[in-house]
Amino acid sequence: MIAEFVAVVVIAYLLGSIPFGLIIGKLKSGVDIREQGSGKTGATNLMRVAGTKLGFFALVLDVVKATAAVILATIIIDRDSGVLTVGAVSVYWQYVAQVAAGLAAVVGHNWPVFAKFRGGRGVAAYFGTLFALFYPAGIFGAEVLAIAALRSRHMSLGSLLGALATWCLMLPLTIVYRLLPPIYLIYGSVVVALIVYQHRDNIKHLRQGTERRLW
């Protein structure tokens, strides 16, 4: 069990570390997007540097890699792996493996070993993990993100609102209706907080009215 769990986390981190924005930027445009725009390797910076189509392609791949990390964890550590009990709290090992893989994928996306630990802000990877954990939250958050980003022309604002929207949906479903395991809400809380932290410079620019706009 321990070896499998460690393997899940390591593989998830390595999957998350694949810098698709950086790779696509170099292959298609011959540019290192870490040296341009925001300096991030995410899809938004690639859109600004190399165009919307390439940026969207990188976005899809960033989502898929994170989804794959959680699905892999679900397969390797199934429901038959037993239950983790801490005091009066019990949770399936599978759920623990899923959120550990999700967090590892997001960390890998933000601090990728394959790109000298200079990555993105974690939004695409977070939504990718949600599509595997609880896809309604992922879809709802993506809709909020798209509407807010298109109306404001600020991807950072859309990303923040979209991430917060997923947490707002998961909160009552976990606490009031008990449809989700509490560990999913804990995971969402941690990653949303991380996303807000990663956008701290964007939040400052939004407040000052100097944030970069889409297109």
Image (cartoon, grey):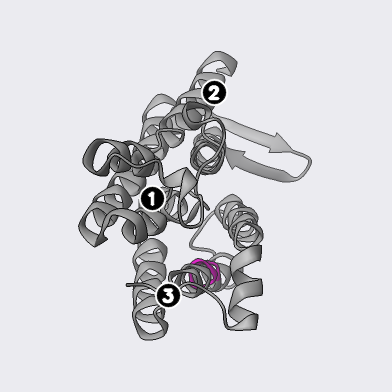
Task: Decide which of 52, 112 is in the foreground and name it.
Answer: 52
Q: Mark 1 points at which residue?
A: 128
The amino acid type found where label 2 is placed reads: Phe
Q: Distance between the residues labelled 1 and 2?
A: 20 Å
Residue 134 in magenta? Answer: no
The amino acid type found where label 1 is placed reads: Gly
Horizontal and vertical percent position of residue 71: 36, 37
Give the residue drawn at x 47%, y 44%.
34
Label placed on residue 10: none
The amino acid type found where label 3 is placed reads: Arg
Marks 1 and 2 in Cβ contact (< 8 Å): no
Q: Mark 3 points at which residue?
A: 213
Q: Residue furthest right?
A: 87
Q: Which of marks 1 and 2 is nearer the N terminus?
A: 2
Mark 1 element type? helix
Q: Quadrant of residue 168?
A: bottom right
Horizontal and vertical percent position of residue 209: 58, 83
Q: Is residue 67 above or below residue 196?
A: above
Q: Which of marks 3 and 2 is nearer the N terminus?
A: 2
Q: Mark 2 points at which residue?
A: 5
Dot 2: few (<14), some (14–19), or many (≥20) neighbours within 10 Å? some
Which quarter of the image is occupied by the C terminus? bottom left
Number of the front mark, 3 or 1: 3
Q: How far apart are marks 3 and 2 (CA)?
A: 42 Å
- Left/right placement of residue 134 relative to residue 58 reads right
Mark 2 element type? helix
The residue stretch that appears in magenta:
163-167
